[in-house]
Amino acid sequence: MSKLRNLMAVTVLSGLSALGFAQSGRDVALYPWTFTDGNKTSRQMVVLTAKRIAENQGLHVIAQDTAYGKFDSLRPKISLDKDLPAEPDLARFARAVHAGNLIFGHVSWHTRSKWVGTGPKTISSAKVDVYVFNLKEGKVTYSKEGIEARSDEKESTLKDVAAILFTPIIPMISGGPATPREQRAVQIALGKALLDWTKMINR
């Protein structure tokens, strides 16, 4: 019986610890994101990049499958047809997923090829609108809209962006498929968009 009581006490304390961690704002959900153009792999890079940036700030990122499942199970459903969900709906989702903050937004891509010298050169541009909703304050506490980046931006201009990522930015290459260019462009754009947020939370 004493072993059972000890086990129950450990379980309760673990639960309280996890709840306290979430309420402290260190748990983050990376949803909801909406997209215009861009293929599946490029869209996945958005979440992966946001995850790396958040984790590099010492935050705990809630599993994306959990975030998707909780969002889809909410009643009444939250519409993503408008520019932004209403803040009460964001609060409802954050509570459901036990997140202190939500990082979400919209990404669009424009990819084109042009002939340079003896071969084609593919260039992709990404435009990012990113928001951070804080559950404790009940509102969006950070936003950057219309942040753009091109896949052919030079590495020398990207030191600040590279510093908040876990892994290097996808190398710049010419010719070939569009996917790596879309991925590189959105890595840079999202890094630019969240750079001031990383400074804000680390003050």
Image: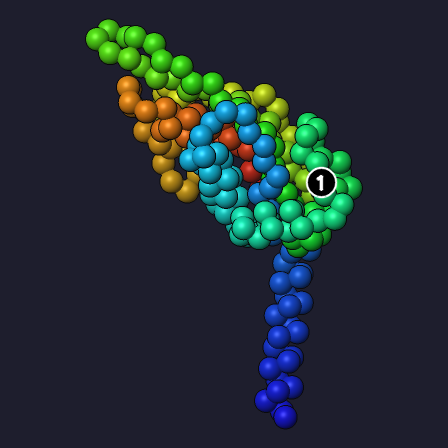
Of residues 36 and 149, the one nearer the viewer is 36
The residue at the point 58 percent across, 32 percent down is 34
The residue at the point 35 percent across, 32 percent down is 170
Horizontally, is 59 left or right of 44 in the view?
right
User: Where residue 30 sits: x, y (%)?
Assistant: 57, 43
Determine whether 64 is above or below 142 in the image: below
Of residues 19 and 180, the one nearer the viewer is 180
Q: Amino acid at mark 1?
A: Ile
User: Where residue 33 sits: x, y (%)?
Assistant: 58, 36
The residue at the point 62 percent across, 63 percent down is 18
Q: Image quadrant for the N terminus? A: bottom right
Colouring method of the image = rainbow
Outermost residue toward the left?
118
Residue under label 1: 78
Does residue 23 appear in this view?
Answer: yes
Q: Residues within 10 Å of mark 1 (few under 14, many from 20)?
A: some
The residue at the point 36 percent across, 13 percent down is 113
Of residues 163 and 145, the one nearer the viewer is 145
User: Where residue 108 sits: x, y (%)?
Assistant: 53, 24
